[in-house]
Image: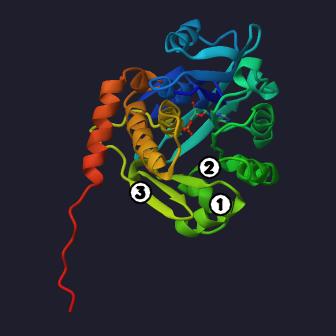
Amino acid sequence: MSEVLIVGSMALDSVKTPFGQADRTVGGAAVYAATATSLLAPVRLVGVVGGDFPREALDFLEGRGVDLAGVELVPDGKSFYWSGVYDYDMTDRETLDTQLNVFADFDPKLPESYRQSRYCFLANIQPQLQLSVLEQIEGPCFVMCDTMNLWIETEREALEQVLARVDLALLNDAEIRQLADTPNLAQAAGRVLDLGPKFVVIKKGEYGAALLSRDEHFGIPSYPLPDVVDPTGAGDSFAGGMIGLLALEDSCTTRDLRRAVALGTAAASASVEGFGLEGLKSLDVGELHRRCETLREMVQFEPIQLELT
Ligand code: AMP
């Protein structure tokens, strides 16, 4: 088993869906990812929070074995705040407010003890900061990165430098179309692979996810759920689950990547079952395993015999 370095936002989120809402609940890409990963492997977290960030949330992470030495606390500052509203389909969302607060000056500094992390997830932050983290780690064996439309529009050059240095890029369907400038997802994945990563994962929300490389095309549906409460953080929980399995087994072959995508899918499904971290917090290893097995059964089928004339 190896440690996982996770860098990204630690936030207070206000989320509204057609069916409910939560105000200033703990979230942030790095917190979702760390919560999912911590079920499988030790986490080293890098982020920044203000004095308003609930102590219980930090205690919870610590209780899960998450190393918080890289989390900066600014006692007289306010935490990153994000607020969004979801459409009736619970997929499309509009950002209502983003207040960077202490995150505006975020300059990830890795404690000495973090520098030799073998697995790393660079959650959605400015690509320059992702580059700075890559400069500070020594010989990682597998690095995944996420990004967002804003950086694709405004920081393409730095983002391309990040992509040239990571093993896997995680993008949702809209982001990869925008990044590769083509509506065709297979073509888009090819163009992103040309930029450097060995693997691309395309997240398609309720329709599942695809894993692509030069010689691999794997697809998986989402885990079927009777009730989706809050999709916020699904992508980060997915990433956290994925990298958690790679670190647990300390192996990242193409076969492992397929299994990691399945495990990420299972972790994401728990995340969307409650507001904020609620769903993910109630997930345990047994339930995670059960969901992986359900997904495994879902994607299996017998050979198809056709009479060829
Ligand atoms: P996801 O649903 O996977 O896109 O992740 C949602 C999480 O990302 C929320 O908890 C937000 O706090 C966080 N978030 C939203 N906007 C940003 C941003 N510009 N930079 C970093 N994190 C963000």
Asked if disc 3 and disc 1 are in contact, CB closer than 8 Å, the reply is: no
Viewport quadrant of the C terminus: bottom left
Residue 105 horizontal/vertical position (percent) = 82, 25
Say which element carries label 2: strand
Residue shown at the point (69%, 17%) measured from the top left: 71
In this orientation, which residue lies closer to the viewer: 249 or 104? 249
Please state which of residues 153 and 267 is positioned toward the viewer in this rendering.
Answer: 267
Q: Position of residue 15 (x, y in %)?
A: 51, 30
Query: For the residue marked with disc 2, what is the amino acid?
Result: Ala
Q: Position of residue 259 (x, y in %)?
A: 41, 45
Residue at position x 80%, y 49% from top?
Answer: 158
As shown in the figure, which amino acid type bears the numbered disc 3? Gly
**Numbered tag placed on residue 219 in the rendering:** 3
Q: Amino acid at mark 1?
A: Val
| Disc 2/disc 3 C-alpha distance (Å) | 16 Å
Q: Report if the beta carbon of the residue with label 3 is closer than 8 angstroms to ligand 1.
A: no
Q: Is the CB of mark 1 within 8 Å of ligand 1?
A: no
Find residue 295 and report its image quarter.
top left
Residue under pointer 2: 169
